[in-house]
Structures are given as C-alpha cells and as structure tokens.
Amino acid sequence: MVVTLVHARVMVNDGVDETCQVCPPPRDGLNRHSLSYNSSMDQLSEQTLAQLIRSPRTAALSTLHDGEPNLAMVAYAFAEDFSAFYIHISKLGKHTTDMVNDPRVSLLIVETDDHRADPQTLARVSIRGVAEILPRSDPGYAQVKNIYLERFPEAEKLFSLGDFNLWKITPKSGRLVAGFGRAFNLVPEVLIKASSLKF
C-alpha cells in the first residue's frame, strides 16, 4: 500500500516503527504526525479478511533458503477457525527443504486482480507463522486431509505419492491491508474472530 504523507511514522513489515527521515525530531521526543495500524478492526475489514482467506485458492509461500528469501506458489486450505493453514507439497521442492531447516514462513494471499486502475487497492493479507510436517500417523491427519480434498478434490492422486506431505502452518502474526487507510496488524485471536463471519 502506498501512503502519501509529508510527516509519518508507520508500522511496517513485522510491526517495526519506521520514522520519517524528512521530519526534524520533535523537541519533546514525540512524533505528532503518525499513522497507526493497530486500531481495532471494524466489521467491514473483518469481513474482508474472512472473504480474502476463503476465496482465493493459492498463496505465495515465503521461506528462508540459505539465509536468502525464497518464494513459491502453493495451494492452501485452512482450519474452520483460521487457527491453521495447510499445504500439500513435494519433499523435492526447495521450499520443503527450507521449512525443514527453518520453520518460519509467511503466506501472502491477495485478492484476485480485476484489472482496476490502481492494483495497489487490492486487498491482501500476509500471515507469518511456523510450519510443521503433519505425519500420516498423526491423529488429526485424516481430518486435515479431508479439509484439503474438499477444497482440492483433484489432489487425491497426489496423496498416493510417497514424496508428498501435508504441512501445517500455525499463524503467529500477520497484516491485513483491506483498502486505502485500512491496514491492521493481526494476531491469531483476530483470525479466529473473523472466521465466525459467514457469507
């Protein structure tokens, strides 16, 4: 999202304050010109978040590969309460090796581009979390498999291949950009609350 401000301190990326380098430091040490993204989320934005998670079927998966960022497109499913996201991927993929070595990941889900004049107004949510493989022996494996296949029935044949595994991503934090001036830092409780909104 592009925010046009002369004086601003904004919360970006992982919630780190970035102070405007143009403005002189205020005499009392306080920044009078700030834009906060931590206010309570309104219901419209909660609805946008819920719809954004449910509607698209693919996301960009970000991993760390030898200390460098790596991106892959993945199909994803999710727990009913948005407390977990599931991907089914081959162990031959670079991103799989990355997650074995470092389970910290991010998912980026973006509203489908409708070719509007300004694509930066498209809603998007980034979810930072921890990934773990879901063993076939796990008591919850069958349920997660059913959740995934309900969303992607064509993936049934991939479950018979030995090199494909289910992974669970547990959200730790995130960020929603629901529109201009509507950006929010997320915690798991916000995701769970949004999941109760049905369409």
Image (cartoon, rainbow, N blue to C red):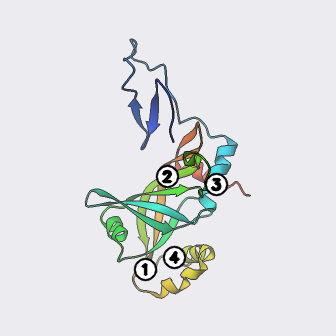
Percent position of residue 85, x then y: 52, 63
Residue at horizontal 46%, vertical 23%?
Answer: 7
Identify the mark at residue 50; answer none if there is no mark. 3
Q: Residues within 10 Å of mark 2 (few under 14, many from 20)?
A: many
Q: Residues within 10 Å of mark 3 (few under 14, many from 20)?
A: many
Identify the mark at residue 164; answer none if there is no mark. 1
Sequence order check: which comes first, mark 2 or mark 3? Answer: 3
Q: Are marks 4 and 1 in contact (CB under 8 Å)?
A: no
Percent position of residue 109, x then y: 53, 57
SS of the residue under disc 3 = helix
Q: Can the viewer see residue 81 in this picture?
A: no
Q: Can the viewer see residue 108 in this picture?
A: yes
Query: How far apart in space, not on screen, are marks 4 and 3 (Cα)?
Result: 27 Å
Q: In the rendered structure, which amino acid carries the disc numbered 3?
A: Ala
SS of the residue under disc 2 = strand
Sequence order check: which comes first, mark 4 or mark 2? Answer: 2
Q: In the rendered structure, which amino acid carries the disc numbered 4?
A: Pro
Percent position of residue 138, x then y: 47, 76
In this picture, is 22 found above or below 168? above
Query: How far apart in space, not on screen, are marks 1 and 2 (Cα)?
Result: 25 Å
Identify the mark at residue 139; answer none if there is no mark. 4
Sequence order check: which comes first, mark 4 or mark 1? Answer: 4
Q: In the rendered structure, which amino acid carries the disc numbered 1?
A: Phe
Query: How far apart in space, not on screen, are marks 3 and 1 (Cα)?
Result: 28 Å
Query: How far apart in space, not on screen, are marks 4 and 2 (Cα)?
Result: 29 Å
